[in-house]
Image: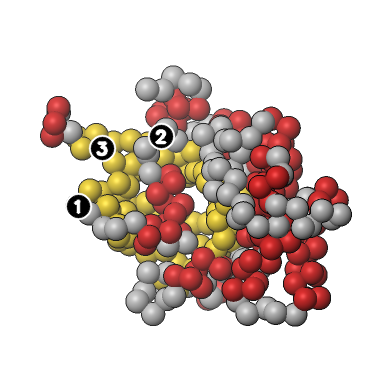
Amino acid sequence: MSMNGHSNRAIDIHNVSVYYGSYRAVKDVTIPIERNRITAFIGPSGCGKSTVLRAINRMNDLIPGARVEGEILYHGQNLYEPSVDPVEVRRRIGMVFQKPNPFPKSIFENVVYGPRLLGVRDRDTLRQIAESSLKQAALWDEVKNDLNKSGLALSGGQQQRLCIARTIAVEPDVILMDEPCSALDPISTQRIEELMQELVSQYTIIIVTHNMQQALRVSDYTAFFSIRKSGEGKAETRWGELVEFGDTQQIFTQPEQAETADYISGRFG
């Protein structure tokens, strides 16, 4: 790995286009994802940022007609090679969704769901996994006396931290977050942002966010996507493209592209 000088990369997205049937949703995206860093994807709705995020752990496979062109390299291996098991990809590259989605099970069973699927049966081991995952997700102190309570009985912010604990429990390497705070209040949002900054010492995090202040607060690197159009009227087609990628401070203070500057300063659309 280190021979090609990319050993500090968790993932290399290389010339990726994503199609739904004959429709190309996003075109020709190249982004290096550094390990143990937070990378934010920003841009207007429909620009392809969530599509690219879902391509990284092969969630688009679940949509009929979806296909990915180009390469997404993880430890030097293209995740779309026929020999790669998408279930294993999703274990190593976990995902937290926009709306908290705990299972209708106890807090404990939510967290140990993945380890159970992987064959962990020993009760003490499961308890240790639950405790360490909930601690990492900054939820343990709030729920340690209520582990048998339904995950659905928690507040929205707690549910999202439970979903993060559930993701952590299978020991992923990368955590994808698709607008993880958009359904949460400001206090819960702050908790999740603080949590991301704690987790990044152990995980590589990629976040899609509509909140530019959030990207500026939490991320090390930012990718700005925008919408491209061609044709008129009924013949119009739209797709997403990466406009600019770089160090977050630089993207927000000295972007190279006028389009990035316009979006960030609100002179957009």
Q: Position of residue 39 (x, y in %)?
A: 56, 48
Q: Which residue is mark 2?
A: 45
Q: Position of residue 101 (x, y in %)?
A: 58, 49
Q: Nearer the viewer, residue 29 or 91?
A: 91
At label 2, the amino acid type is Ser
Looking at the image, which residue is at 18% across and 33% down? 236
Cα–Cα span, label 1 and label 2: 21 Å
Q: Picture quarter containing residue 112?
A: bottom right
Image quadrant where one finds the C terminus: top left
Q: Picture quarter containing residue 54?
A: bottom left
Vertical arrangement, residue 207 with respect to residue 120, above or below: above
Q: Nearer the viewer, residue 56 or 59?
A: 59
Q: Nearer the viewer, residue 84 or 14?
A: 84
Q: Position of residue 29 (x, y in %)?
A: 37, 51
**Counting other residues with Cα less than 10 Å from the Cα at mark 1, is it few (<14), some (14-19), or many (20 or more)?**
few
Q: Earlier in the sequence, mark 3 or mark 1?
A: 1
Outermost residue, top side: 267
**Counting other residues with Cα less than 10 Å from the Cα at mark 2, is it few (<14), some (14-19), or many (20 or more)?**
few
Q: Which residue is mark 1?
A: 22
Q: Which residue is mark 3?
A: 238
* SS at mark 2 in the image: loop
Looking at the image, which residue is at 41% across and 23% down? 268
Cα–Cα span, label 3 and label 2: 12 Å
